[in-house]
Amino acid sequence: MIQSQTNQTPSPTFWQRHWSKAIALILWLALLGLYFWYTRQNNLTLADSVTSLADLLTNSFFGPLLYILIYAGRPLLFFPATILTLLGGFLFGPIGILYTIVGSNASAMVTFGIGWFLGEDVLKDEEKSGVIQKYTRRMRENSFETVLIMRLIFLPYDLVNYVSGFLKINWKAFLLATAVGSVPGTVSFVLFGASFGTLDELLAGEVQLNPVTVIASVVIIGISLVLSRIIKKREAGSN
């Protein structure tokens, strides 16, 4: 009895369970405080501040680099990747595909690293028959194919990153699968973001969509899903 009690691992504290959310909340509060201070100091409205930020990103030499850095640090703030991807197309047009691919891969490695740091060895020798352990082995043994399929079927971006890091799969296979598998989704969402009108039209509520880019976006999503099924069938046939 005494031995079984001593072998029990202590339950994590509240801070250990929620430290990442607390840090994200602190960062959000700091950003909001900085935003309100800046707008009050310069007598800016919400529309003025949005226009000023958009002008900084699009008309500054360091704008694309700033966008990539924001994208890379996005996971620390739990900011949705989809919104930034759409903004990449809206602000930069088709060239935003390049900036977004670089930024998204950087953010993927950030979240992968966090998952790796927090993860534990979930594949125990005495639990090899469990469903979770079977999927864990699949991800570790077929890291590239598994992550590639998850990217092509548009599973939540950060969830895939965290799980891959937590399971400590091969980071090179993860990065390559992310770089390849994220391309269709990135192109699709950037084109959709680029299909909107200008910023002034958007702020005025005059949303206009370019039907050509919208159709291209939908077609690319369909191609991505078809590719995922082909890869999955080939992987199943080879096993």
Image (tube, rainbow, N blue to C red):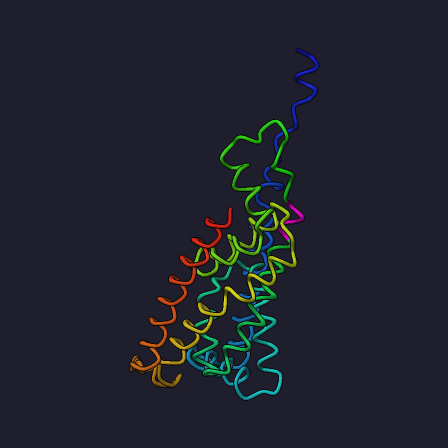
- Residue found 50% across the figure and 77% down from its top: 97
Give the image location of residue 209, x and y in percent. 30, 80
Using the image as rendered, state which of residue 200 and residue 127 is in the foreground.
Answer: 127
The image quadrant that residue 48 belongs to is bottom left
- Chief secondary structure of the magenta span? helix
> What's drawn in magenta, residue-wise?
114-118
| Residue sticking out furthest to the top | 1
The quadrant of the image that shows the N terminus is top right
Give the image location of residue 54, x and y in percent. 49, 81
Give the image location of residue 221, x and y in percent. 38, 67
Give the image location of residue 211, x and y in percent. 29, 81
Query: Does 179 appear in magenta?
Result: no
The image quadrant that residue 7 belongs to is top right
Q: How many marks?
A: 0
Using the image as rendered, state which of residue 1 and residue 29 is in the foreground.
Answer: 1
Q: Is residue 136 left or right of residue 228?
A: right
Is the residue 122 above or below the residue 109 in the image?
A: above
Q: Is residue 226 left or right of residue 182?
A: left
Is the residue 126 above or below the residue 116 in the image?
A: above
